[in-house]
Each structure stands twice: as C-alpha cells, then as structure tokens.
Image (cartoon, rainbow, N blue to C red):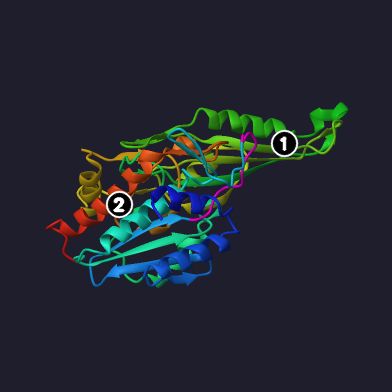
C-alpha cells in the first residue's frame, strides 16, 4: 500500500470524533500484519521502535470534525482532482497519520539511538481525551512531534484557549417602569464594549491576545427588563499569559460575574535551542520556527519539548472539500523520517 493508497484507506473509513473504532480496527490489523507490535487503549493505538532513551513521541489524531455544508462530493470517499486529494480528514490530520506510518516503515530498517513511539489517538477535535488516556502508558518521553497541517513549517509555539462565561445580573421589572429596574443586557453591553478594546502583552511568535465575545443570551420577554444576560468570551492565549491571572484581570475590569468555563488548553512553547526544534528545522530545511494560532494535543504534552508540524495547510481544515496536495504527503513522510533521524543524531542530547 503506497502513500496515496494508505491515505485513501484512512479517509474512506469515517472517524468523526467519538466514532473512531472502525479506523482503529483497520490500523491495528494493517500495522500488525506489517510486524509492528501495536498497543491499544480504547480506540487510540501506538507502537514503539528501538529501545531506551532518548524516547521520541510522534503523535497525530484519527478523528475528524463532522462534515459541514458545502461538500461537492462524498466527504468519506477520497477523490482526485489533479494534484488535489479531496476528503474529510485528508488534510486534518490523516495526512500526518499516513506520513508518520510511512516514516515508521522506513525507520524500521535502521538502528535508532534510542526509541520512538508512534501514537494515533482519538477525540483530538473535542477535548483531547485520547492523548490524555494514552500518555501515562508511554513511559518517560523526552521529546515529541505533533502531526498537524502546518505546510511543514516548524511550529515551536502554540496558542492556548481560555473560555470565560460572564453573567451580568440585573433587576427585573416592567419595561414601562424601566427606571426602577436594572437592565442586565445593558450591563453586559458595557462589558462587551470594554472587552472589545482590551489587548494583552504580545508574544514574539504569536502576537497579541484579544478577547472575542462568541455567544450572548439574555431576556425572557419583550416587555420585561432582563435581570440576567450571559455571554461567552474566547481568548486564544500565548505562553507569556497565565490563565488564572488573565481571568482575574478581566474579572476586575467588568461589572459582570466572570466564571472560567474552560482553561485546559494552555499555550505552549519550546525554546529553539532544544534538540527536537533543531532536528525538525534541519529536516524541514528551515532556519527558524513559527507560531501556530490553533490548539492541538500539544497542550497535553506541555512539560515535554515538542514541535507541531505536518503536511497540509491548517487553513483548509474544517472546510468543505478539504484537500491535500499529493506531493505534500510524500514530503511529509520524508520530513518525519528525517526529523527522527536528526533528533537521535544531535550530539548534545544526553538523557
């Protein structure tokens, strides 16, 4: 099974988050027949080559988002349009899964100066349960490569995500006597205006963080002063911003009550001096790393030196007619193979 055939097989097995079993079954069978010792936790799978330290992790995800409107063909059937390979997950991130498998096939013929684990996990698109379940079973990890579509740019910094639920409290009353009430929507509007002008300390690779109000709900009837208005704020954070302090800072500036809805996606960064960054840059032929504005399972590996890189383009993800270019798949396989080799060859790595 060559690169395109492998990607076709992966795309043609639907694996929307929460429904990855069929794809995990397929890969367990395929990789087992090829001689890999596949381990499984739920519908996440992994295998290891080599032994000892340093221990490199290559990880990507099996799941996809549900197909959106606008597809011009079957999302679950890879189709070809010139150089385009069109299908749900072709770009995000089954191209990385396929390319990593191709790299593992090639590296199996070499003697690694340590060990490398390939992990293909579930539910990356809706909370990261897969990587969080698998990680404790992998032992000590010295470095990681997270496979995501980055145009093979080496991302050594990634934004996090802080979601705040804000509740403006007021006093209900008849609209005809509004002066005796306290309009919660008006209070929320003042806070939303405050949020629209807020910026926070910029990061050298990721820039500044600006809060974005994404949902709002308030009022019970058209003739009643609303006593409650709820709105959600999404902040795509950077490594120099602490989520606890950031939430407290925003809370002190608003009239509304501020509740942390979600803060588990912490922003991460790896210094360019780390061996994994140098190895990835050498493999990609790049001189410096870049920042990534999207989150990924890297957030759950934040204590490990890591980079995010893979074939495809993040701007194609979660869109109708998602696609990968054929040459990107081969380039991705070459990159993952070279990055692993470079990592083990870096002289200053001593574990």
Q: Nearer the viewer, residue 251 or 24?
A: 24
Quadrant where the N terminus sits is bottom left
Does the CB distance between marks 2 and 1 fall below 8 Å?
A: no
Q: Is residue 30 left or right of residue 22?
A: left
Residue 4: x and y, percent? 42, 47
Relative vertical location of residue 70 with respect to residue 17 in this rendering, above or below: above
Image quarter of residue 13? bottom right
**Which label is found at residue 184?**
1
| Residue drawn at (60%, 58%) of the image | 18
Please tell me the numbered disc located at residue 336: 2
Name the residue at 25% across, 48% down.
280
Q: Position of residue 269 (x, y in %)?
A: 33, 48
What span is in magenta? Answer: 62-72
Q: Nearer the viewer, residue 196 or 122?
A: 122
Viewer-nearest of discs 2 and 1: 2
Label 2, label 1: how many angstroms apart (C-alpha)?
A: 54 Å
- Residues packed near mark 1 inside 10 Å, few (<14), some (14 to 19) or many (20 plus): many
Q: Quadrant of the C terminus?
A: bottom left
Does 278 sit above or below residue 46? above
């Amino acid at each position: 099974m060559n690169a395109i055939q492998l990607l076709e097989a992966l795309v043609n097995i639907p694996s929307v988050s929460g429904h990855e079993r069929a794809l995990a079954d397929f890969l367990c069978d395929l990789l087992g027949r090829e001689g890999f010792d596949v381990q499984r936790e739920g519908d996440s799978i992994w295998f290891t080559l080599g032994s000892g330290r340093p221990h490199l992790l290559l990880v990507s995800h099996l799941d996809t988002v549900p197909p959106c409107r606008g597809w011009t063909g079957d999302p679950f059937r890879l189709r070809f349009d010139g150089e385009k390979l069109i299908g749900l997950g072709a770009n995000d991130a089954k191209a990385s899964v396929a390319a990593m498998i191709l790299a593992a096939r090639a590296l199996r013929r070499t003697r690694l100066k340590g060990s490398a684990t390939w992990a293909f996990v579930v539910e990356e698109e809706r909370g990261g349960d897969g990587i969080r379940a698998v990680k404790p079973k992998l032992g000590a990890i010295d470095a990681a490569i997270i496979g995501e579509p980055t145009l093979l740019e080496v991302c050594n910094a990634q934004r996090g995500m802080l979601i705040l639920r804000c509740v403006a409290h007021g006093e209900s009353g008849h609209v005809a006597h509004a002066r005796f009430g306290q309009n919660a929507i008006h209070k929320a509007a003042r806070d939303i205006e405050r949020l629209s002008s807020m910026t926070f300390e910029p990061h050298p690779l990721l820039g500044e963080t600006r809060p974005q109000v994404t949902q709002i709900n308030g009022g019970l009837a058209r003739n009643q002063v609303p006593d409650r208005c709820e709105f959600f704020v999404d902040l795509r954070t950077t490594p120099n911003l602490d989520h606890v302090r950031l939430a407290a800072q925003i809370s002190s500036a608003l009239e509304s009550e501020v509740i942390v809805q979600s803060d588990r996606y912490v922003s991460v960064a790896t210094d360019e001096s780390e061996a994994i960054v140098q190895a990835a840059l050498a493999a990609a032929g790049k001189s410096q790393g870049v920042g990534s504005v999207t989150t990924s399972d890297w957030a759950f590996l934040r204590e490990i030196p890591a980079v995010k890189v893979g074939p495809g383009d993040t701007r194609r993800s979660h869109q109708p007619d998602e696609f990968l270019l054929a040459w990107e798949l081969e380039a991705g396989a070459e990159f993952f193979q070279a990055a692993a080799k470079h990592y083990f060859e870096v002289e200053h790595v001593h574990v």
